[in-house]
Image (spheres, rainbow, N blue to C red):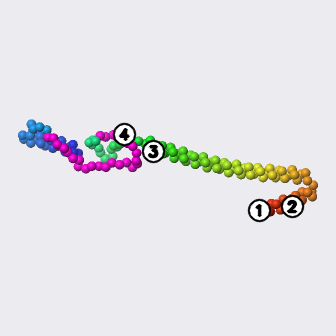
Amino acid sequence: MAARLNLLLIAALSLLPGLASAEPVRGFTRCAADLQLSFPLAGRIAQTLVREGSQVRKGDVLMHLDRAAEELDVQRRKVQWQGMADLMIAQARAETSGKQLAAEAQISAAEHERRIFACLTEAERTDLHRILRKLRHALT
């Protein structure tokens, strides 16, 4: 805007009689307003698309931020979530395996008892059943 004002001033002065052949006017111009620019995220500027003094319009992209740090953070979070998912899967598998082992142990114990009972007389079986009931009752 200051550059336009400067050109208009020179053009207006050149139209005045007696100033048409005068030397060019030299001087300093001031900005009508200084602007503070900011980004919604912190980071390094990767690319500047305009130069100082360029005319820009509302919505024009002036600069691009380096996205490397943001992309690394996204990757870190993906790895973190994947790690948590893998941990949950491993815990579920361990729990399932533990339940399967416990079930197999019960089956093995039952099979062992069956074999022992097969070798005993009827009186011995009755006594053993009574002892096992007492043990089970005491453990619960």
Task: Confirm whether residue 72 shows in the render.
Answer: yes
Instruction: Check if residue 39 falls in the magenta segment.
Output: yes
Q: Which residue is found at the position 20% from the left and 45% from the top?
A: 29
Q: How much space separates mark 2 and mark 1, taking CA atoms? A: 16 Å
**Range of magenta residues:** 25-51
Q: Which amino acid does label 4 sit on?
A: Gln
Label 2 vs 4, first from the N-terminus: 4
Is 80 on the left or on the right of 60, as rendered? right
Q: Where residue 109 appears, x then y in whole percent? A: 81, 52
Q: In the drawing, what numbered circle is on residue 130?
A: 2
Quadrant of the drawing holding the N terminus = top left
Q: Say if mark 3 contacts mark 2, CB within 8 Å.
A: no
The 10 Å Cα crowd at callout 3, few under 14, some 14 to 19, many 20 or more, is some
Is 84 on the left or on the right of 110, as rendered? left
Residue under numbered circle 3: 70
Label 1 vs 4, first from the N-terminus: 4
Q: In the drawing, what numbered circle is on residue 51?
A: none
Q: Is mark 2 on a helix, strand or loop?
A: helix
Label 3 vs 1, first from the N-terminus: 3
Q: What residue type is labelled 1?
A: Thr
Residue under numbered circle 1: 140
Q: In the drawing, what numbered circle is on residue 47?
A: 4
The 10 Å Cα crowd at callout 2, few under 14, some 14 to 19, many 20 or more, is few
